[in-house]
Amino acid sequence: MQALAHANPFAPTLQAAPIFGQFFNGAATGLQLDHGPFTLGWSFDLTAAITGLAVFHDNGVGLLENHTVGIWNAAGALQVTGTVIPADPCVLDQGGLQEWCTVAVRPITLPVGTYTILATWNNLLDPLIFPGTLAAQGLANLNGPNVVLIQNEFVAGGGLNDPTNSTGDAMSYFGPNFLTAVPEPGTLVLLVSGLLGAVGVMRRKFNA
């Protein structure tokens, strides 16, 4: 399991801008829990490296409490965890309309598979997106690259525990989120060019 440190969420990653696992097609407004504490989130299929964790941020309103975030694999083993605090930076997602407060992680590549991300909401001070919140605002959630949302997940209590409950609804608890590393086209071109060059050198040595 990898713990996170508070650092610049943009370095060192392959992307020029943050790419999130889920984002919205508009600027959403969250709601506060009226009872709790709860640990809330969503499950997903992943084929990308994780570079950071995040929590929902109502634009213009900073976080008021700490949120511990974790990602579990399908066997219930915690893979990576960290705590997003009010002092951490809040950045726009790839839609450019919604901010997420983030904490960086050294890039960790998880095997292709199904995972669950959850975050703690202990003091009920910060808002989050509930199932149905986006639809009520005329908005929708969108899958980031190499990520497919499955359903919401939650567990009662403020501890960071493997989820045991779901309504089976793809409209989810978008409190936690994560950043992924997606190579830029230029990076891919350089990578391919380097591979082709290496092949050419090997051929010349073989034919010599």
Image: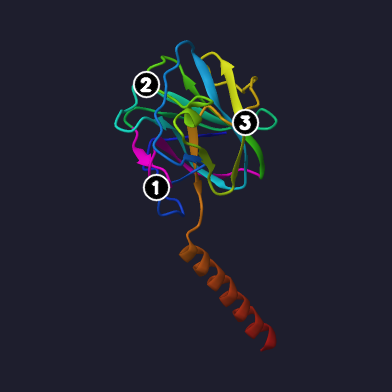
- Mark 3 closeness class: few <14, some 14–19, many ≥20 residues within 10 Å: some
User: Residue 130: horizontal and vertical position, in percent?
Assistant: 50, 24
| Numbered tag placed on residue 32 in the rendering | none
* Residue that extends furthest to the left in the rendered view of this protein: 60
Q: Quadrant of the N terminus?
A: top right
Q: Residue at x 66, y 27 (%)?
A: 76
| Residue receiving disc 3 | 151
Q: Amino acid at mark 1?
A: Phe
Foreground mark, 3 or 2, reads 3
Circle nearer the N terminus (3, 1): 1
Q: Is residue 129 visible?
A: yes
Front residue of 202/139: it is 139
User: Residue 91: horizontal and vertical position, in percent?
Assistant: 36, 41
Q: Quadrant of the C terminus?
A: bottom right
User: Residue 46: horizontal and vertical position, in percent?
Assistant: 61, 43
| Residue receiving disc 1 | 10
Element at label 2: loop
* Residue that extends furthest to the bottom in the rendered view of this protein: 208
